[in-house]
Image (cartoon, rainbow, N blue to C red):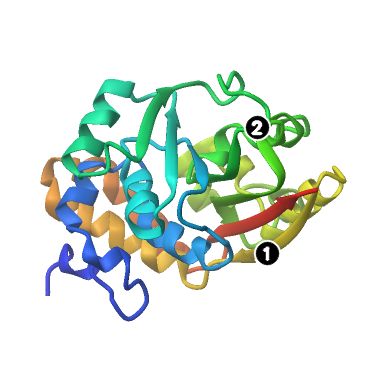
Amino acid sequence: MTALSDLVRPDRYPRSSRYDPAWLLDLDMGPNPLWLLEDLAGDLDLRPGARVLDLGSGKGATSVFLAREYGVRVVAADWWIAAEEASAVFDAAGVGDAVEAVRAEAHALPFEDGSFDAVVSIDAFEYFGTSDHYLPYLLRFLRPGGQLAVATPAMTREARELGAVPSHIRQVVGREAMAWHTAEWWRFQWETTGLVDVTSARLQPDAWRDWLLWTRAGIEHRPRGRAAAQPVIDMLTEDGGEFLSFALLTARKH
């Protein structure tokens, strides 16, 4: 069995397993985005025709998945990927009529208030969402009763509680890990705004194993990337799930 075939796991991720692993890895901007989204969507009520903002959509895999699997209309917003590049992915995947690509920075979103029924962010929220001021800003664009869903790298314990980021993590990701909070940190952060009801806040079981499978498959698909990927493999193997995870979070706007 190859590392690439390990990305087809119909027992745990039946929807994601219908997608070509090589296609997914060609769009790689973070670990196993469809697995994260499929798991997260189980805590959501995504109805056909709903308007969804995919915030930090990268090269577009999650937006394709949302449109195909749930029949929603997606606005794919990312700062690092040109709208033309993302649109080409959507057209090639046959969802160009359901997904609109927008180049936008997360703190300057070009949308009207109440534009969306849901906001989804996969492996991106840690870069802009930890500020005390960000959630109130983002909620402007969500209608009352709308849903917010985030999958973000997490720690099983806060770095502040540990006294430092564990060395095997700090050596690979540096200070970025300071934004990798526990699920309960996120719950408190959101609930204390008084603007949302948090409907779920959990760590994904064996998230580090999924991340490891993805990284190994990436090396097989793109061997020249081994030098960059091997430290991640070493970090995950040493950690073994002691500290590293992903937090899956959902909430409804009041």
Is disc 1 placed on a helix, strand or loop? strand
Q: Which quadrant holds residue 57?
A: top left
Residue 200's disc number? 1
Percent x, y of residue 32: 35, 56
Seen at 78% across and 47% down, the residue is 189
Farthest front residue in view: 49
Seen at 65% across and 32% down, the residue is 141
Of labels 2 and 1, the one closer to you: 2
Percent x, y of residue 91: 21, 36
The residue indicated by pointer 2 is: 141
Q: Amino acid at mark 2?
A: Phe
Percent x, y of residue 48: 46, 55
59 relative to 209 in the view: left or right: left
Q: How many marks?
A: 2
39 relative to 233 in the view: left or right: right
Is disc 2 placed on a helix, strand or loop? loop
Residue 140's disc number? none
Determine whether 3 is above or below 32 in the image.
below
Q: Amino acid at mark 1?
A: Ser
Asked whether the viewer can see residue 175, the reply is no
Determine whether 216 is above or below 100 in the image.
below
